[in-house]
Amino acid sequence: MNAATHERLARLLVGAAAAITIALLVTVVMGVAAPGAAHITPSFLFTSPRSMGREGGIAAPLAATVLLLGVALAVAAPVGIGTAIWLTEYLRQRWLVAFITFATESLAGVPSIVFGLFGFAVFVLRFRMGWSVWSGGLTLALMILPTIVRTAQEALRAVPPGYREGALALGATRWQALTRMLLPAAWPGIATGMILSVGRAVGETAAVLLTAGSALGMPRHLGDPARSLAVHLYILAAEGISLEKAYATGTVLIILIVLVNALANRLARPPRAGKERWPWSRRPSSNSKKSKSVTMTCRPSPASRSAFRARR
């Protein structure tokens, strides 16, 4: 068998694998969306469920899902990004970095039901929060925290070393270099990790059911119990309440996940030539008549001045 035959065989195998993957995706999506799309109406989206979900829509589960994701992101994003900054920029003990990284990756592989049991034992019972948006959101924050830490860590490592060296050489402190150079450059990767973690949290059922409950009503505040879209779909299908509503809820859930993944891919995509992704990275054109030359003065920090005197 010559090299050309090997090449054709390899293309055939990888093409067949790609075709099988696409066929499975289309089968799953169409199997849910085909019977559910006909039941998605404005009244279905903007009315709360009634009669255990047999009537009404998904306004309350949709609002509960948004609240749960908001609490999870508000807690996990600062902690995850701060942990990634500490591991990447400040911690110098490699063994400790390796240990924390291993612990973070191990935490990402824990099943969601274990997080649910932990949230039920700690937030619901120990801290007496009860079944509430707070308990569910904090449990989801623990679940998405490893994803945010790892993606933010890799995004900061991907920033060219010249950014750090140039900022420090101009007299900037480490914090100034981090906030003005490194974080803006790494933000697309960090934002992508946050959005992908949201896509995982949207579909969680067991952890939310054990911590946020399954109340049908609209949550008035974060202390109320709530039912997310995934939990609503599970109850409708498992108890045989209304398969039509279950298919429609599943279709809305698929649409949300597709939108989240599309946004993540858009942020991860490199900008086109001649276009900048962020407004603060735009530079005035040299051919423009209105462009003015700007002289930038950089003052060395006290630490750099003292180091320079010591060298003299």
Image (cartoon, helix red, strand yellow):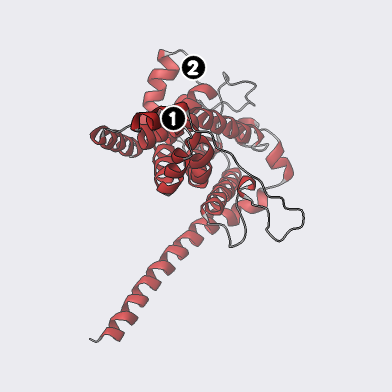
Q: Position of residue 143 (x, y in %)?
A: 41, 34
Split into 4 quadrants, where in the image is the C terminus? top left
Q: Is residue 248 left or right of residue 311?
A: right
Residue type at the position of mark 1: Arg
Q: Which quadrant of the figure has residue 249?
A: top right
Q: Position of residue 78 (x, y in %)?
A: 49, 30
Q: Residues within 10 Å of mark 1 (few under 14, many from 20)?
A: few
Compared to residue 135, the image places residue 175 above or below, namely: below
- Asked if residue 113 can be seen in this view, the reply is no
Q: Which residue is mark 1?
A: 305
Compared to residue 273, the image places residue 224 above or below, namely: above
Q: Position of residue 220 (x, y in %)?
A: 65, 21
Q: Which residue is mark 2?
A: 130
Q: Residue at x 62, y 24 (%)?
A: 219
Q: Residues within 10 Å of mark 2 (few under 14, many from 20)?
A: many
**Nearer the viewer's eye, disc 1 or disc 2?**
1
Q: Residue at x 57, y 34 (%)?
A: 65
Split into 4 quadrants, where in the image is the N terminus? bottom left
Nearest the viewer among 85 and 216 is: 85
Residue type at the position of mark 2: Gly
